[in-house]
Each structure stands twice: as C-alpha cells, then as structure tokens.
C-alpha cells in the first residue's frame, strides 16, 4: 500500500497508520497513553539532542534509515556521558511512499532501540506531496550520572587519543550503493552504549568524547583542539582503516580522515588510563578494532597534525565543502 495525503489528515487513515505500524512496533506503556506529550520519570541532570535523517538510499548494506536514526541520536547522548532513556520520532512521508518500506524501517527502529536500551515514547507523522521519500526527525533524552563531566574543552597536554574502530565504513557503504559499485563494505551503524558504559564504570578519566559522523575524524579532532586550545598529533599508520575501504578511497581520491561513520567514536583520556581505555573498548561490542592513534602534544595552538610513515608532518584541517554523499 502506498502513502496518500489522507494518511496525513489526522483522521481515520492516520489512526490506522499509527496503529498498524508505529504503535505495533514501538509499543510501551508511555506511548500507549497516546497523549500530546509523554510524561516520564526524570533526573537532576539531563542531556537532550535532536537530529534529522534524510539519507538515500533508505536501505543500505549494514543498515537502513531506521537503525541509523536511533544509533545517531543515542550516540550523541552517550558522548556527553549520559545514559540514553527516551526517544521521540517524527516522520515526514512523501505521498507515494510504500507502507511496506515504512514498516521495515519502523521494525528496524524498534529492534535498534531495544539493543540500545531506550524507549520510543512519542512521535508525529506528516504527509507531504513528493515522490515517495521518507525522512525522520528524532529527539533524545538521557540522564547524566553524578560526577560525570565530559567536554570538548578538557583536553590537556599528555592526554592520549583513541578511536573505537575502522574509519569510513558507513560513508563508503552509502557511496557504493548510490554509485552501484560492487563490494562487501557494510555500514558500521551501531549504538555505542556498552563501550561508553565500560569506560565510565572502569573509572577511565575521559576528557573528551565524540562520535565520528559528518566531517570525519579530522573535523572532530579539530573541534577538540580548538575548544581546548591544544595541538593534537596523530600517527598515520595507527589509523584503523579496512583494506577494502582503503582501496575504495584510493580509487575515488577520498581521505578516511574526513569520511563519516555511524558507529565509531573518538575519545581523549588521561595518559595513565590509555591502556585501560583501549582494553575497555576492544572488549566491548563494536570495538574490536579500537586503537590508540595519537596524543595531545602541547597547549596553546588549536591544531591537528598527522605524522606520516616517512617521517613527514601535515596539518589536518576541518572538512571544507560538501562531504558527499549525504550519509545520514
């Protein structure tokens, strides 16, 4: 069945769509009340985020827009040290979208939310004229435990930089699908709660933490360096990139440092906790390729450098221009 303008009318067709797809997959006691707002238990300190997802294609190797929107929102909350609890979702459906696709996406969202330990407690649906597109906006709320304070501006000289796994997988998967390039690259789309919880429960002194999405690792670390007014130095041969993605980049002239991911994070930790942090990441789901990739070498500069295998050094800037294709 195709989405029609009637599905956005607020009448019977809307109710049938909500009951037949969204309520069926997202069912929980809070959502079941069907109020205009969800009333949920709270905490003294909360983290709040919102994001919109417009990726094409809707389905790609390793995931789909449904898994992507849950992972993206949950991971944003996790990077402040919060424990994600609740999500809301708003669907913008173009007339002509297939309800079969919508149900697959909704089921994927429900499965990923369960994996991430969050509840989808509120939502909205709008139907607009178009050519069958599906877009999703999500908001997330998480609770920040007492004593946790993680910020981009906390990097210090001597701190160690880690990344949780191979760079560029999601970007390469989306681009391959859109360009009809045959390979076995899959998106790394994943929730990182187990990894973040392992770091915090082990008492690792986490200074800064960020998921590596649009703009890539190079842009994220420049934001850390600017906020902390420090110089970060990376070691090129330590950067984890799969052989297939590296070959893909060589063919298309791409740099893994600027490719987006949806299941990777970078973390800056106190030097005495570097090995502990690496062990926590490697022993967590989705962290088997975690690596120590560099350090904060000085203060007062606000820049990122890359040490090459032949002994040279180059400046890593932020991403300029459009990081094609749209990955989320």
Image: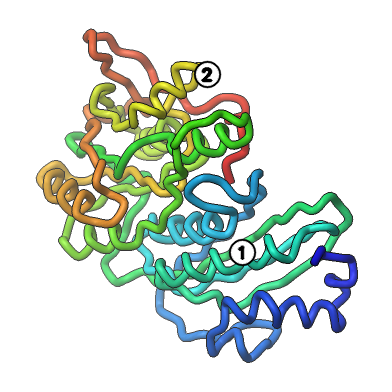
Circle 2 sits in a helix, a strand or a loop, which is it? helix
Q: Position of residue 206 (x, y in %)?
A: 25, 52
Q: Residue at x 34, y 49 (%)?
A: 209
Q: How is the image coloured?
A: rainbow
Any mark on residue 208, and which?
Answer: none
Name the residue at 83% across, 57% down.
Answer: 96
Q: In the figure, 200 relative to 168: above or below?
A: below
Residue at the spot x=58%, y=76% of the render? 25
Q: Is the residue marked by circle 1 packed among few (<14), some (14-19), or many (20+) residues within 10 Å?
A: some
Q: Which residue is mark 1?
A: 104
Q: State the mark number for residue 252.
A: 2
> Residue placed at 26% from the left, 67% from the top?
147
The quarter of the image holding the N terminus is: bottom right
Between the C-alphas of marks 1 and 2, the distance is: 32 Å
In this picture, residue 109 sits left or right of residue 167? right
Report helix, strand or loop for mark 1. Answer: helix
Q: How many marks?
A: 2
């Amino acid at each position: 069945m195709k989405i029609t303008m009637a599905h956005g009318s607020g009448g019977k067709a809307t109710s049938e769509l909500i009951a037949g797809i969204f309520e069926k997959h997202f069912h929980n006691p809070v959502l079941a009340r069907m109020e205009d707002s969800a009333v949920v238990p709270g905490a003294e300190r909360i983290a709040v985020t919102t994001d919109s997802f417009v990726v094409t294609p809707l389905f790609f190797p390793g995931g789909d827009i449904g898994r992507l929107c849950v992972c993206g929102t949950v991971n944003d909350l996790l990077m402040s040290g919060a424990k994600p609890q609740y999500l809301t979702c708003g669907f913008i459906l173009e007339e002509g979208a297939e309800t079969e696709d919508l149900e697959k996406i909704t089921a994927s969202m429900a499965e990923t939310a369960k994996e991430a330990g969050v509840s989808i407690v509120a939502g909205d649906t709008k139907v607009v004229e178009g050519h069958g597109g599906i877009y999703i906006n999500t908001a997330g709320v998480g609770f920040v435990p007492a004593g946790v304070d993680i910020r981009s501006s906390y990097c210090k000289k001597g701190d160690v930089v880690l990344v949780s796994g191979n760079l560029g997988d999601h970007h390469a998967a989306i681009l391959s699908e859109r360009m009809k390039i045959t390979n076995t690259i899959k998106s790394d789309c994943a929730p990182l709660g187990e990894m973040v919880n392992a770091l915090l429960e082990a008492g690792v002194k986490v200074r800064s933490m960020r998921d590596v999405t649009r703009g890539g690792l190079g842009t994220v670390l420049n934001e850390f360096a600017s906020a902390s007014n420090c110089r970060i130095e990376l070691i090129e041969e330590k950067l984890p990139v799969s052989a297939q993605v590296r070959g893909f980049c060589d063919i298309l002239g791409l740099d893994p440092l600027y490719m987006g991911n949806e299941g990777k994070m970078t973390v800056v930790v106190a030097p005495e906790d570097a090995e502990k942090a690496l062990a926590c990441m490697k022993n967590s789901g989705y962290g088997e390729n975690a690596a120590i990739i560099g350090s904060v070498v000085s203060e007062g500069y606000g820049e990122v450098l890359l040490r090459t295998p032949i002994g040279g050094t180059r400046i890593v800037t932020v991403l300029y221009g459009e990081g094609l294709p749209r990955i989320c």
